[in-house]
Image (cartoon, rainbow, N blue to C red):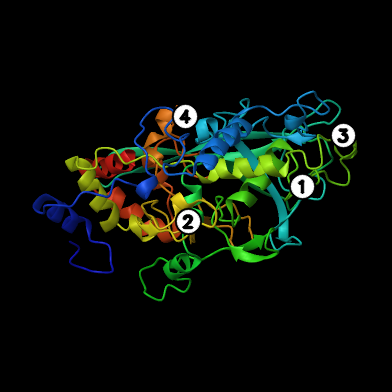
Amino acid sequence: MNPWPGRPAPVAALVLLLSSCELAPPPHLLGGDTTIFDETPNAFAQPAPGLERDDELHFFVGNSFFNQNWVLAPASTEARDGLGPLFNTRSCAGCHFKDGRGRPPEGPREMGTGYLLRLSLPGAGSDGGPRPEPGYGGQLQDQGIPGVPAEGRAVIRYESVKGTFGDGEPWELRRPVVSIEDVAYGVLSEDLLVSARVAPQMIGMGLLEAVPEGAVLALADPEDADGDGISGRANRVWDEAAGAPALGRFGWKANQPTVAQQAAGAFLGDLGITTPMHPTNDCTEIQEGCRAAPGGGDPEIAEDDFRKVVLYASTLAVPAMRDAEDPRVVSGFHLFQETGCAACHTPTLHTEEHPTFAALSNQTIHPYTDLLLHDMGEGLADGRPDFEAEGREWRTPPLWGIGLVETVNGHTFYLHDGRARNLTEAILWHGGEAEGARDRFVALPGELRAALLRFLESL
């Protein structure tokens, strides 16, 4: 369709071509054979079809560990005690409600749901990742068990950013300004780096884990050798289980290589629960109450139960696209590609043999991500390196399921810190390598902008 292969089409050409061509609909089985057909508030909470019988049974055990609250140790419920001593939430579902997306505070007096602050100092830590703040560690934990003061409180305020679409319609964004108050363990370092994050939805993680590393690296173009203005870099991170560097696939900066390591990090940082991968609590040298607090076991979640949680997180199914043959969705799908969005949000990937779950193997999937880091511009920069990710770089997030976030979670907050209140705002925040695609979206007539958004809402 594009008469200028390798380059996004000019806006005038898009208008002409979309009005004159018969267009093919987008693929709707986003998770391949593991796709489910569910548009309800439980759309993100279903097991992938085709699991082995035992795995399907273990899925529901993992579901219970994911959703139920952890309690203080010691307790009669020995399988679920050991919360804290410092933590952000009492259950995985406290951040990933219904396996969906968290949201930021709306103002300085509200606590977010599935919202936290990463902390670090300039330079690299012992494993090559962020260097933790010496008194507070790598994450602000805003809750503590009795006798262990919470580390502090994240306070968020918003500034207005205004602009205008090409057709004259005005828009207004909100820029978050984050501070930390009520600190309990001394003054924070002067060169502290802070990055706000919301919890992403959980679907399709095992499928992304089964995409061959070579396929991801083939999409990278760190020196922009093809001259299209899009680079894409792989993040090389530390694999705790392998004891070696590995490709980062998960997290807002692609700083985790596997579902298991992502889950273990969340157990320790968000819940204060030790796992086989992280067997000791994350207390700093000056946090004496934290270091002296009773534990709930060694580790606090047994290895067999931890594996069931990893199984659960790996096999959450991806819902099918809706209304794939709706003319506006079809137009929006082609606009998505021709404006340049698909240069990073890669529509189609293929999985190889999954080492554990056969149902996830050899699937053609449509996650709309390349799993690579991209410079997203100063507007979204957090200035905080994370392994090889720089302060302006973020991993391309998968878009599958994005149109069901409102149904599942009751809100439409997007981007890494939830600043965007809808999909339009999320696009308008794109800068850096994505600036060209953003500008082409801004220049589109209102009806074509609506078609592109309708496509995203159908995912």
Residue 48 sits above or below residue 148 on the image = below
Residue type highlighted by circle 1: Gly
Q: Name the residue located 73 percent from the left edge and 39 percent from the top edge.
A: 301
Return the residue nearer the eye: 220 or 45: 45
Task: State which quarter of the image contains the N terminus.
Answer: bottom left
Q: Nearer the viewer, mark 1 or mark 2?
A: 1
Q: Which residue is mark 1?
A: 137
Picture coordinates of residue 313, whole percent (x, y): 55, 42
Q: Is residue 402 left or right of residue 280?
A: left
x, y percent for residue 142:
72, 33
Residue assigned mark 4: 409
Q: Amino acid at mark 3?
A: Ala
Q: Earlier in the sequence, mark 1 or mark 2?
A: 1
Q: Residue under circle 2?
A: 376
Estimate the spatial distance between the alpha carbons at disc 1 and disc 3, rounded to whole Å: 17 Å
Of marks 3 and 2, the one in the foreground? 3
Query: Which type of secondary structure does the marked residue at label 3 adopt?
Result: loop
Q: Are dots 4 and 1 in contact, CB under 8 Å?
A: no
What whole-number distance in Å separates the C-alpha atoms at marks 4 and 3?
35 Å
**Nearer the observer, 217 or 135:** 217
Pointers 2 and 4 in contact (C-beta within 8 Å)? no
Determine crowd level at label 3: few under 14, some 14-19, many 20+ residues with C-alpha closer than 10 A: some
| Pick the front one: 178 or 416 | 416
